[in-house]
Amino acid sequence: MAAAAELTLLEKSLGLSKGNKYSAQGERQIPVLQTNSGPSLTGLTTIAAHLVKQANKDYLLGSTAEEKAVVQQWLEYRVTRVDGHCSKDDIRAVLKDLNSYLEDKVYLTGYNFTLADILLYYGLHRFIVDLTVQEKEKYLNVSRWFCHIQHCPGIRQHLSSVVFIKNRLYTNSQ
């Protein structure tokens, strides 16, 4: 999904009225937002943080110094590790890292939903939607996190819902 489309989804999920126009620059199609009151903003995470502040939802950027740093870490991870890496091996490495990290966490910062969760969800959607049932089971923590995020109000919007099958346990009643 193009960064401009993600930013439009983010605007809507934050309750902002549409009106921002995004362009893209360079070979990697880096998003640019021309603001009404100042210089243009460049980069997915820079623009996303600006939109969060515009919506007065600063808690999505983290509430403590440590949490803010973790949000920044995952936003950077999104741009450096997820964007532009299309090979299956690259994505498997990302999913393996993320699966291990999420083993004891509900959200990327632990127990608080943040912008990092939203943008990583948007960035991974195109890959997760194509995973087989076996691959989803292999990355169980990622699957749990992804399923949880896609059900947060206003996040998924028009993106296709990814189905995660839960195996039922049957008792042998003879």
Image (spheres, rainbow, N blue to C red):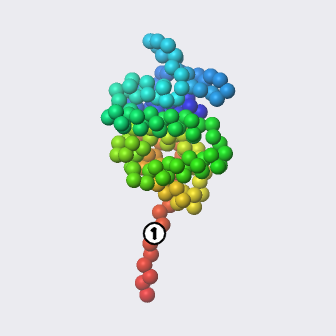
Which residue corresponds to the image point at 49% horizontal and 29% vertical from the top-left?
A: 45
Which residue corresponds to the image point at 36% horizontal and 37% vertical from the top-left?
A: 67
Q: Position of residue 27 (x, y in %)?
A: 67, 27
Q: Quadrant of the N terminus?
A: top right
78 to 23, vertically: above or below: below
| Residue extending furthest toward the bottom | 174
Which residue corresponds to the image point at 43% horizontal and 24% vertical from the top-left?
A: 50
Q: Quadrant of the C terminus?
A: bottom left
Disc tally is 1
Q: Position of residue 164 (x, y in %)?
A: 50, 57
Q: Is residue 92 left or right of residue 147?
A: right
Q: Crowdedness of circle 1 by 10 Å Cα count: few (<14), some, many (20+)?
A: few
**Towards the viewer: 123 or 9:** 123
Q: Position of residue 37 (x, y in %)?
A: 44, 12
> Residue beneath label 1, please?
168
**Towards the viewer: 163 or 53:** 53
Q: Quadrant of residue 171?
A: bottom left
Q: Position of residue 3 (x, y in %)?
A: 56, 31
Which residue corresponds to the image point at 35% horizontal and 29% vertical from the top-left?
A: 58
Q: Decide if residue 40 is in sight here.
A: yes
Amino acid beneath label 1: Arg
Q: Decide if residue 115 is in sight here.
A: no
State the SS at label 1: loop
